[in-house]
Amino acid sequence: MSKLKNGTPNKYFSNVEPYLEEISRMALNMTEEQIAKELGVAPSSFRGYKHRYPALVDALKKGRRQLVMELKSTLIQKAKGYNYEERKKVYENGELVREEVYTKAALPDTGSIHLLLKNLDPEHWAENPQALELKKQELELQREKIEFQNWRPVD
């Protein structure tokens, strides 16, 4: 086990590196603090490992990307509406008599629709289209300023 500058043992190689794939999966459902505790590492050490070991950052990013994709998919499903089955067990005198299955509809959610349109089509759904246009112009001016500052005459 290697040691850090202050003499404390570095658990990265024993408690973190062998579990990078698992860390990607953990990142779908857990905070970084929870992941650290699950690995037997102090949260402060875990944060330090992120600065020293790019493989850990990549593993966390991979899990977070997957989480974002799943959340986007769920939000889209909620915005569009969907059908689902609901099961109900019917008991008489403490015994199961039958199980009833109902198909129900979750109607499209206007809040989800608004959020998706605002983020996926901001030119048409921005809350303040003038501010969006001004931001675009500001970015273009900043780009031109950087190009001008980096300009050097050719000898």
Image (cartoon, rainbow, N blue to C red):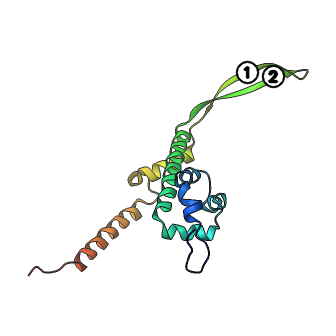
In the displayed structure, 151 sits above or below 43; it is below
Q: Which mark is residue 90?
A: 2
**What's the distance in space between the residues labelled 2 and 1, CA to CA?**
7 Å
Q: Which mark is residue 51?
A: none
Which residue position is annotated with label 1? 100
- Give the image quarter of residue 151: bottom left
How many neighbours does mark 2 have within 10 angstroms: few (below 14), some (14-19), or many (20 or more)?
few
The residue under the point 52% across, 51% down is 21
The residue under the point 51% across, 47% down is 72
Answer with left or right where residue 128 lies relative to residue 18: left
In the displayed structure, 106 sits above or below 37; it is above
Q: Are marks 2 and 1 in contact (CB under 8 Å)?
A: yes
Q: Nearer the viewer, residue 46 or 66?
A: 46
On the image, the x and y values in percent for residue 69 come to: 49, 47
Q: Amino acid at mark 2?
A: Val
| Quarter occupied by the N terminus | bottom right
Q: Residue at the left extreme?
A: 155
In the displayed structure, 3 sits above or below 26; it is below
On the image, the x and y values in percent for residue 37 come to: 66, 61
Q: Residue at the top extreme?
A: 97
Q: Secondary structure at mark 1?
A: strand
On the image, the x and y values in percent for residue 154 come to: 10, 79
Answer with left or right where residue 34 lies relative to residue 113: right
